[in-house]
Image (cartoon, grey):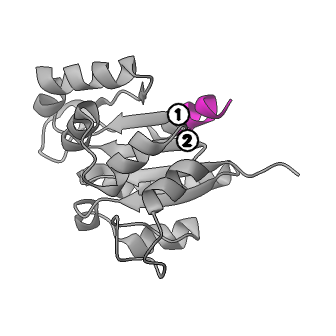
Amino acid sequence: MVKQKTVILCVTGSIAAYRSADLTRALIEKGLKVSVVMTKEAEYFITPLTLASLSGEQVFLDMFGHLDDPLAMPHITLAQKADVVLIAPATANMIGKLAGGIADDLIACIVLATKAPVLIAPAMNTQMYRNPIVQENCRKLAKHGMTIINPVEGKLACGVTGDGHIADENDIVKAVARALK
């Protein structure tokens, strides 16, 4: 029997977080198990209940206090069970944290603890995305073996059209499939 592949879908506090619902469904339709991890900022844009309902799995929200076992270490457990870690959407904040090796939340700790491929789908305002620091951080993460799924040009929440719009769901799913091979 073949083990079902697990995607740890990490959702950060971008308006594009609402797209994680369709992304969860699309990954499940490809036969993947999806475990969702959310930052507290992501909860402003989409509820954990929505993603738990779609994934059929517990949604992880923080490092401590949500498990019955006080000795549980979700950052290690999730890092070990991951076949792929996908951060979609990835904010400039999360990209910067990862580039700096800062491990102050569950997502960053999972990324630092996993041996699985890490895919990052940035989503933010065009000027933020084009900022030289954000670009440098993306290059640094790519240099360390992480895959950046580049955003596309599109209408952004701030009213402008530009790059920074999260990549198309199908392109993200294809990137996950490539990472699993």
Q: Where is residue 69 in the image (x, y as percent from the top left)?
A: 48, 78
Query: Can you say whether 111 is above or below 162 in the image?
Result: below
| Magenta run includes residue 177 | yes
Side of 174 relative to 140 (left or right) = right
The label shown at residue 117 is 1
Residue highlighted by disc 2: 84
Query: Can you say whether 129 is above or below 109 in the image?
Result: above
Q: Which of marks 2 and 1 is nearer the N terminus?
A: 2
| Magenta run includes residue 128 | no
> In the picture, which quadrant includes the C terminus?
top right
Q: Where is residue 113 in the image (x, y as percent from the top left)?
A: 45, 44
Side of 134 relative to 32 (left or right) = left
Q: Which of 100 and 158 is in front in this view?
A: 100
Question: Which structural element holds mark 1?
Answer: loop
Question: Which structural element holds mark 2?
Answer: strand
Q: Which residue is drawn at 29% across and 21% down?
A: 140
> Is residue 154 among what the camera can see?
no
Disc 1: CA contacts within 10 A as few (<14), some (14-19) or many (>=20): some
- Residue at the far front in the pictured view: 71
- Residue at the far bottom in the pictured view: 68
Query: Can you say whether 57 is above or below 149 in the image?
Result: below
> Is the residue under label 1 in contact with that under label 2 (CB below 8 Å)?
yes
Q: Residue at x 54, y 37 (%)?
A: 115
Q: Where is residue 100 in the image (x, y as percent from the top left)?
A: 22, 33
Where residue 48 sits, quadrant-wise, is bottom left
Amino acid identity at mark 1: Pro
Amino acid identity at mark 2: Val
Magenta residues, start to end: 173-181
- Distance between the Cα atoms at labels 2 and 1? 5 Å
Q: Residue at x 39, y 22 (%)?
A: 144
Where residue 162 sits, quadrant-wise, is top left
